[in-house]
């Protein structure tokens, strides 16, 4: 079933309740015409035994200008998403959203989503969830309560989902004309991988979801829905991978 707006999605979710649905599983269950794109967990070769991964759904990032007390109008980028859990038990997570620009010859920049954006969050909630039905939360808000388990046979919109919003405040100021970027989503899984270098360092990598986007406009023609999915010439816009998170000094004897 396709949902053509957020209101239709929410209404259907409430009516569906405990409706049963069986559907074939894939790593990226894409429904381009729906408001959300669904990304299923995918087993990778670096996964150790017992690794769990949550399901994720998102709408392409949007652009909005909101009023911030004491600062006037502020243009921000944001992404609405939700998470649901079919791992067999509740999971406590701290999701992180890193936006990395990737224009050839352009300014390379990295932005982490704001954990407590205050008045900006309230303004965006009025745009995306005016009735409060979705209960949009920041990453910090989501980290305070375990993601509840949902039955394995359920599919969206009947799953028990937790909705969130990732917000980036400084993208328009630092890279106003960016056209290509990636959002790296970590914290959806406990997948970790380590590798020792020849220099005795320990490289720690996290299982991460990569989402690729393009923005075929510039700051002058800025519109809310400027940002589009980048399907990488048919190769897909979503990908699970292990991404380097940090490098540690390996302790003697370890």
Image (tube, rainbow, N blue to C red):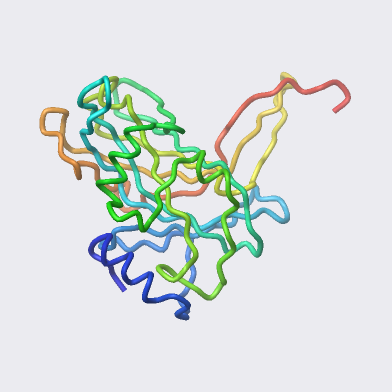
Figure quadrant of residue 5: bottom left
Figure quadrant of residue 82: bottom left
Residue 91: % across, % down? 63, 53
View extreme (left): residue: 221
- Which quadrant of the figure contains the C terminus? top right
Which residue occupies the foreground of this view, 11 or 202? 11
- As displayed, is residue 172 above or below residue 45? above
Which residue occupies the foreground of this view, 76 or 202? 76
Is residue 180 rendered to the left or right of residue 220? right
Which residue occupies the foreground of this view, 253 or 187? 187
View extreme (right): residue: 253
Residue 245: % across, % down? 58, 31
Identify which residue is drawn at 55% across, 56% down: 54
Identify which residue is drawn at 51% across, 46% down: 142
- As displayed, is residue 147 above or below residue 178? below
- As displayed, is residue 121 above or below residue 43? above
- As displayed, is residue 167 above or below residue 70? below
- Which quadrant of the figure contains the N terminus? bottom left
Identify which residue is drawn at 35% across, 38% down: 121
Is residue 92 rendered to the left or right of residue 114? right
Which residue occupies the foreground of this view, 85 or 143? 143
Residue 39: % across, % down? 44, 57
In this rendering, the count of numbered labels is 0
Residue 210: % across, % down? 44, 44
């Amino acid at each position: 079933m396709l949902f053509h707006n957020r209101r239709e999605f929410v209404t259907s979710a409430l009516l569906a309740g405990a409706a049963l649905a069986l559907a074939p599983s894939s790593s990226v269950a894409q429904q381009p015409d729906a408001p959300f794109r669904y990304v299923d967990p995918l087993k990778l070769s670096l996964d150790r035994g017992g690794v769990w991964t949550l399901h994720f759904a998102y709408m392409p990032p949007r652009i909005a200008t909101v009023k911030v007390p004491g600062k006037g109008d502020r243009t921000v980028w944001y992404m609405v998403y939700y998470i649901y859990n079919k791992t067999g038990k509740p999971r406590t997570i701290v999701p992180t959203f890193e936006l990395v620009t990737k224009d050839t010859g352009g300014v390379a920049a990295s932005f982490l989503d704001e954990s407590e954006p205050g008045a900006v969050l309230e303004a965006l909630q009025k745009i995306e969830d005016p009735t409060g039905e979705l209960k949009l939360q920041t990453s910090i808000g989501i980290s305070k309560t375990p993601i509840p388990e949902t039955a394995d046979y359920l599919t969206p919109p009947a799953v028990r989902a937790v909705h969130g919003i990732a917000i980036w405040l400084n993208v328009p100021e630092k890279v106003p004309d960016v056209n290509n970027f990636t959002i790296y989503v970590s914290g959806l899984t406990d997948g970790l991988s380590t590798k020792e270098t020849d220099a005795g360092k320990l490289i720690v990598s996290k299982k991460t979801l990569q989402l690729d986007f393009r923005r075929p406009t510039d700051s002058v023609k800025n519109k809310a829905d400027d940002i589009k999915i980048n399907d990488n010439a048919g190769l897909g816009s979503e990908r699970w991978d292990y991404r380097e998170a940090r490098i540690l000094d390996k302790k003697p004897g370890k």
